[in-house]
Amino acid sequence: MKDVGPVEDEVVIEKMKSSAFANTNLESILNAKSCTGLVLVGFTANECIDATARDSAAKGFETFVVGDATATFDLRDSSGKLVKAERIHKLTLININAFHAKVVNTDDILV
């Protein structure tokens, strides 16, 4: 298995907040490269992916979330009842698709 890491002059952005746009230079990097869209994958769908998709759309980027390349984990609601990750993930993707970005699958996005 090959090591996973940046290649050649690939840009690395360290984020400390939910959105990849918060307190980073992501927007200026994308603008400098004349990027008009983003493809989002990763963890967690209901926090980081959602926040980044919202910010991306608000900033005018065409935004895609690869639903089968995102994930979340079980959470407890305010009464302590366990809500399974599958349900949270499904509802998160429905909300993102309805309001902020187009949700696609890996097969849709690979060329």
Image (cartoon, rainbow, N blue to C red):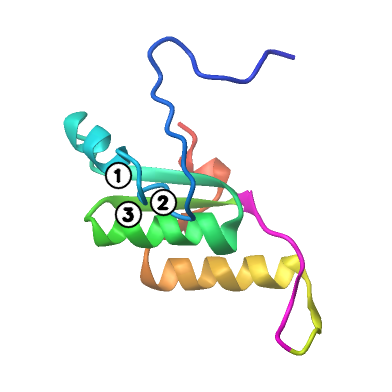
The amino acid beneath tag 2 is Phe
Q: Where is residue 76? Give x, y as percent.
A: 76, 77
Looking at the image, is mark 3 or mark 1 nearer the viewer?
3
In the rendered structure, find residue 56 and report the number of the disc placed on it: 3
Q: Residues within 10 Å of mark 3 (few under 14, many from 20)?
A: many
Q: Residues within 10 Å of mark 2 (few under 14, many from 20)?
A: many
- The residue shown at (18%, 31%) is 32
The stretch drawn in magenta includes residue 72: yes
Which image quadrant is residue 24 in? Answer: top left
The residue that label 2 is drawn on is 64
Compute the Cα span from label 3 to label 2. 10 Å
18 or 2: nearer the viewer: 18
Residue 4, compared with residue 18, is above or below; it is: above
What kind of element bears circle 2?
strand
Circle nearer the N terminus (3, 2): 3
Q: Residues within 10 Å of mark 1 (few under 14, many from 20)?
A: some
Would you say the residues marked 1 and 2 are in contact, meaning their CB atoms lie under 8 Å apart? yes
What kind of element bears circle 3?
helix
Residue range in magenta is 69-78
The residue that label 1 is drawn on is 37
79 or 86: nearer the viewer: 79
24 or 90: nearer the viewer: 24
- The residue shown at (30%, 38%) is 25
The amino acid beneath tag 3 is Ser
User: Which quarter of the image is occupied by the N terminus?
Assistant: top right
